[in-house]
Image (spheres, grey):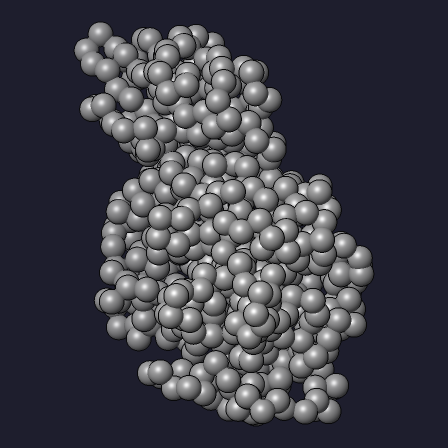
Amino acid sequence: MTLLREPHHDGSPTYVSDEAPAPGSVVTVRLRTDPADPVDRVWVRTTYDEEPTYHPCTRTAVDDGRAVWWEGALPVHNPVTHYRFLLASPEDQRWLTAVGTVEHDPPDAFDFRLSSHDAPPDWARDAVVYQIFPDRFARSAAADDREVPEWAVPAGWDDEVVFEGFDPRTPLQLYGGDLDGITDHLDHLAELGVSVVYTTPVFPGESNHRYNASTFEAVDPLLGGDAAYVRLAAAVHDRGWRILGDLTTNHTGDTHEWFVAARDVEGAPARSFYYFLPDGSYECWMGYGTLPKLNHADAALRAAMVDGPESVVARWLRPPYDLDGWRVDVANMTGRLGAVDVNHEVARLVRRTAQAERPDALVIGEHNHDASADLDGDGWHGTMNYSGFSWPVWSWLRAPASPARAFGRPVPAPRRPGGSVVRSLLEWQGRYGWRATTCSWNILGSHDSARIRTVVGAGDVHRVAAGLQFTLPGVPMVFAGDEIGLEGVLGEDSRRPFPWDSPGAWDDEALATYAGLARLRHSTEALRRGGLRWAHVDDDTLVYLREHPAGSVLVAARRAAAPAVTLDAGRLGFGDGSLLLTTGDDGDLVERDGVVTLPDVAGPTFSMWTL
């Protein structure tokens, strides 16, 4: 019960009057404290041109003995406003930051954040995103008639993926999935509740992943070419959904027309697009010579790639493709090389260019560690949130005997207790700020990582992971196949073909859980726009509230058998208690003597109730 007595603030509508305020405006921020808390004075501390300033808060209401509400006026002077609360009582002083209350003077790193830059498009935060690796999703009838290129190692749809060691066949193994194959299976996505289709690159490249593009001017003929991409985009839009492309702004392939000209043609304009060294070699991504790095310090390269209506970024957002935005590959490395760092400038240009074509365009940057320096509000709208979501969830739910290999880490992901996991979630939420967190993608895995089913093992735990993905702040991004229990010990192994002809091998319970969660997310504003208040945390149980003026939701996730949990009904704001979803035997909640009890469980379960 004690967590419900903690002071609380977050960036949701309950606590912040305007999440995208105009520069020079004043925002009302609200703080909740407990009636038993001796705090009698509160200030909101911000920085004015980096100088701390304090603004008194007023005690405005006592909510039936459940909560005391304070309000303060927060001036928006700088583009990104950092703030925290000072809570004073006759006995002590405390700070409230995005990671909770502390009794020492903490650094500003975990302050709350408010951006005066334009907010991300509304549709992006309401989305359920589905990631597709085109070569492995589905083959259309036309796929059999296409000639396999010389570079490829052809594979049958049921062949095993080659992924161990440094087998040269791994990036060359071609299964022949194509864009019309995706279009043919959009009904499956509809049943799942998808609203955004995101494919990995569709430009030609001498690999199955196509991150080594040979041009940005056309769609790979192996995928059906430009016409197939137009058909897919039109079919997606006809359903009222969105479609996102995948763009490598950091590098091209070594067969790209720009690079070939730069390397082979004396005085070629594209020479300045890359980093050539005096000995004739060149900078490339992580030492891979097939991926020469682009020089974003060069104005001509920017004009060709990211800046203005003739750039690659702009061209594909116009008819006939009408992409709704981009996921940017290795966004963390784009524009960075040694002492050169124009990353933020590139991010701004990508966003500005995209929004000039489509005012509601979305730009998501790939980043697998600390993206906070890249999410200041005027560049990437959000990130693929590995650090702030994937790794904490993996560390809470990982099966001890799992063969899954950690992404970029030399040892397996650790198994940690609930308290450590919540601390991690709060710190990343604080570092990114509420708005960027809620626009970033909650991913349980991707084409670059192990599959969540392999990480956690049993189907019951898999469904707990899905529950967290759809109910914690952020946008769920489902990697195609997760919903039916596909496995993979690392990224390349996770790129297994979708078993359309073997539905008996699907995990139907997982599929039903994903679809149910998506329906609830679409219909429940609290899951898309609500705040996050922790109600109970122990080693094996996480209980939290998603609070919104339109109605709130109580969520309980258990990774193992767990005892009953009692919650103070008043401080919970309990009203209804109707069960929304459960993977176990939970029923409606009932208040008795001011207490709501979540019953004990015999194993991993995930449940949700209205409040």
Quadrant of the rendered structure where residue 360 is?
top right
Residue 37 visible at all = yes
Q: Quadrant of the N terminus?
A: top left
532 shown above or below 485 = above
Give me the residue at 75% from left, 86% from top: 142
Residue 501: x, y in percent?
A: 62, 85
Residue 136 visible at all = no
Give me the residue at 41% from left, 41% from top: 373
Residue 137: x, y in percent?
A: 60, 76
Q: Nearer the viewer, residue 322 or 97?
A: 322
112 shown above or below 394 = above
Q: Nearer the viewer, residue 179 or 294?
A: 294
Give me the residue at 43% from left, 78% from top: 493
Residue 589: x, y in percent?
A: 46, 42
> Does 498 sit left or right of 42 as displayed?
right
Quadrant of the rendered structure where residue 594 is?
top left
Q: How many marks?
A: 0
> Does 503 sit left or right of 490 as displayed?
right
Residue 608: x, y in percent?
A: 49, 47
Q: Nearer the viewer, residue 278 or 259?
A: 278
Give me the residue at 65% from left, 66% from top: 216
> Does 244 sit left or right of 464 as displayed?
right
